[in-house]
Image (cartoon, helix red, strand yellow):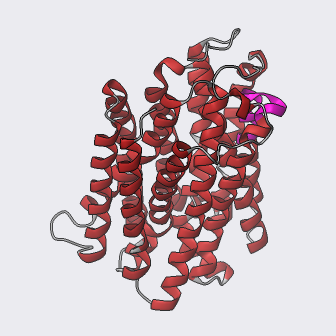
């Protein structure tokens, strides 16, 4: 276990982490409820509209790979603040309502989010290693709160502010405030030279554990979890709008999907940490997620409960999947540098693979004219994730 950095109180680190994490899904979640408005205003096809979100997620992969290098250059804490500042800059760029700035701003948002995700893993291991699972669940919950707020208010904001681009740009404000609150913590933190098991990897700039079997399995797990998350993040609202729902009602459905993830991420991560029953909890969560996806595709509007039950089940799967993957990496890493490099590989590969999901679904939608085949991609991802859970369960630290 890595000792905490000197000069910084753990409580201040935790508060700062939670504020920064609020910004690591909001800018992404703000786009899907506005997707139909953006398509109409900019004359985009479904594939082109999906490409915008795919670009963000692809750049999250690039940012994840760059995370360890940024940490070596500026230190884990300062690099984390810089990464969230990039997220805010990307949101502000999207203020101009043209295709070029929409895509360009989305690239910056994705790169900043990807780097911040890796840097958070290292910061948690450095400062709060004793409760890594619970803290990971807490900052993932903070991310989900940001996503929930964005999903719920982005359409009303577009109406109130007079356009979708202004609604997207609003999310630069919380990013700036979070970085301002975090910077005193970053300035007081000491630079660390990695030592102990695994440090030889971290000492090489940009080195990633490609040959490590655990890291590859973790990357597979995170990739399939991310495919399901970003597939539904982008297309849940448009899917139900295609079934006749009003945009406001579809946005509320997506908000419910986000809300349910909040307690799931925190509670299941804490339960798994208590007895290290990772395989049981990850497998159970995946069953819920796949069940919700299958129900939404084959019985999208059941009487009485409507689609709300399906959205809740999907949320259990993706809400628990991401923090459980990060928690497992934290538990099995000997120090912060090793946790950061393994997270960089897992998140980088995961996001690069997940980036294809919104685009593939959009292209298949253009080709087939219906959602069942395109969204069936998410069921395939669930099957591959089940394989990775079984393999990780058999593999001992």
Image location (x, y in percent) of residue 378: 41, 68
Main SS, magenta region, reads: helix
Q: Nearer the viewer, residue 179 or 247?
A: 179
The magenta segment is 71-84
In which quadrant of the rendered view does residue 266 lie?
top left
Q: Is residue 208 left or right of residue 140?
A: right
Report the residue at 51% width, 61% height from top: 230
Q: Is residue 115 left or right of residue 290?
A: right
Residue 117 seen anywhere in this rendered image of the structure = no
Image location (x, y in percent) of residue 88: 72, 46
Q: Is residue 307 left or right of residue 395?
A: left
Image quadrant holding the N terminus, namely: top right
Residue 388 falls within the magenta-colored stretch: no
Is 295 drawn above or below residue 9 in the view shown? below
In which quadrant of the rendered view does residue 373 lie?
bottom left
Is 110 drawn above or below residue 369 in the view shown? above
Report the residue at 55% width, 20% height from top: 128
Residue 72 falls within the magenta-colored stretch: yes
């Amino acid at each position: 276990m890595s000792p905490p950095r000197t000069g910084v109180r753990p409580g201040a680190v935790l508060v700062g982490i939670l504020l920064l994490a609020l910004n690591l899904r909001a800018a992404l979640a703000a786009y899907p409820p506005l997707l139909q408005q953006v398509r109409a205003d900019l004359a985009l096809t479904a594939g082109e509209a999906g490409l915008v979100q795919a670009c963000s997620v692809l750049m999250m992969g690039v940012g994840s790979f760059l995370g360890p290098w940024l940490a070596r250059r500026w230190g884990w804490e300062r690099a984390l603040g810089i990464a969230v500042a990039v997220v805010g800059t990307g949101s502000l760029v999207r203020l101009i309502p043209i295709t070029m700035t929409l895509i360009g701003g989305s690239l910056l948002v994705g790169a900043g989010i990807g780097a911040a995700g890796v840097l958070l893993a290292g910061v948690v291991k450095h400062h709060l290693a004793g409760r890594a699972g619970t803290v990971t669940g807490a900052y993932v919950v903070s991310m989900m709160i940001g996503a929930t707020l964005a999903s719920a208010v982005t359409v009303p904001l577009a109406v109130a502010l007079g356009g979708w681009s202004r609604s997207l740009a609003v999310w630069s404000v919380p990013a700036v405030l979070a970085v301002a609150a975090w910077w005193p913590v970053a300035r007081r933190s000491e630079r660390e030279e990695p030592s102990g098991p695994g440090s030889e990897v971290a000492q090489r700039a940009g080195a990633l554990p490609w040959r490590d079997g655990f890291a590859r399995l973790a990357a597979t797990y995170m990739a399939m979890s991310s495919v399901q998350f970003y597939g539904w993040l982008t297309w849940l609202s448009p899917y139900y709008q295609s079934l006749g729902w009003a945009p406001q009602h579809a946005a509320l459905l997506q908000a419910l999907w986000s809300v349910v993830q909040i307690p799931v991420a925190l509670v299941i991560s804490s339960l798994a940490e208590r007895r290290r029953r990772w395989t049981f909890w990850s497998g159970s969560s995946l069953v819920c997620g796949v069940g919700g996806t299958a129900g939404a595709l084959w019985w999208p509007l059941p009487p009485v409960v409507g689609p709300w039950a399906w959205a809740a089940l999907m949320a259990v799967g993706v809400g628990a999947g991401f923090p459980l993957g990060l928690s497992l990496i934290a538990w099995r890493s000997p120090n912060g540098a090793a946790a950061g490099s393994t997270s960089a590989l897992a998140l980088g590969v995961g996001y690069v693979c997940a980036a294809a999901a919104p685009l593939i679904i959009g292209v298949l939608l253009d080709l087939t004219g219906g959602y069942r085949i395109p969204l069936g991609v998410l069921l395939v991802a669930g099957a591959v994730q089940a394989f990775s859970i079984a393999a990780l369960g058999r593999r001992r630290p």
